[in-house]
Image (tube, rainbow, N blue to C red):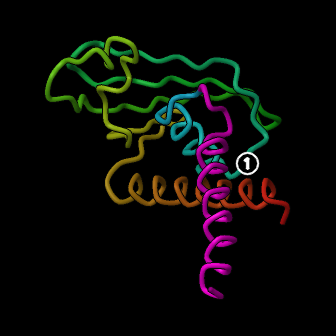
Amino acid sequence: MQQATIQRPAALLMSMLIGSSILLGCANPGEDVRVRLCKDLVVGQLGTSQLTWTQVSTRTPGYSDATVNLRWSAAAGDGSASCAYRYNAVDDTAQQLADPLSAYATSPSQVVINGNSLSGQALATAIAQAMQRQGRELIDAAGKAIGH
């Protein structure tokens, strides 16, 4: 009986955490994960989050790489970036018609920030750091949602 009493609060807490993570998974729930990752890569490489995004566009040219193009302004000056995502679908689906970016990888194969290319190990490290920041933001948001 004691074990059942302890398990209920734990199950309730787990349900709240899962629900919070679903609701708070993105800073902007309408923003595609590729766009969010590209922005986070820029922030990480520039070392500042004090950017004002002035343009965000995506291009999905069929079976070629999709691109996310960003422009921003900041105290240090304006800038631009481009993140390329490889086509990753096996078959064409209704999901891809509704959301063309869903046919592409979620990790960029090429990133260019202010004319400087990231590739190989530098790109892998930048992606890992951006994903770690996203994970910390998710945990912080979930903690705030449950009142910690």
Residue drawn at x 67%, y 79% is 5
Closer to the camera in the image, 96 or 112: 96
Image x and y of residue 14, in percent: 61, 64
Start and end of the magenta stretch?
1-30
Residue underneath mark 1? 48
**Main secondary structure found in the magenta portion:** helix
Residue at disc 1, secondary structure: loop
**Crowdedness near tag 1: few (<14), some (14–19) or many (≥20) residues, C-alpha within 10 Å:** few
Residue 105, quarter of the rendered image: top left
Residue type, mark 1 in image: Thr
Is residue 11 on the magenta stretch? Answer: yes
Residue drawn at x 68%, y 65% is 13
- Give the left or right position of residue 82, taking residue 132 as reference: left
| Quarter placement of the C terminus | bottom right
Residue drawn at x 52%, y 41% is 37
Image x and y of residue 43, in percent: 64, 45
Is residue 116 on the magenta stretch? Answer: no
Residue 9, quarter of the rendered image: bottom right
Toward the bottom, the furthest residue is 2
Residue drawn at x 70%, y 26% is 53
Image x and y of residue 137, in percent: 68, 55
- Give the left or right position of residue 147, taking residue 14 as reference: right
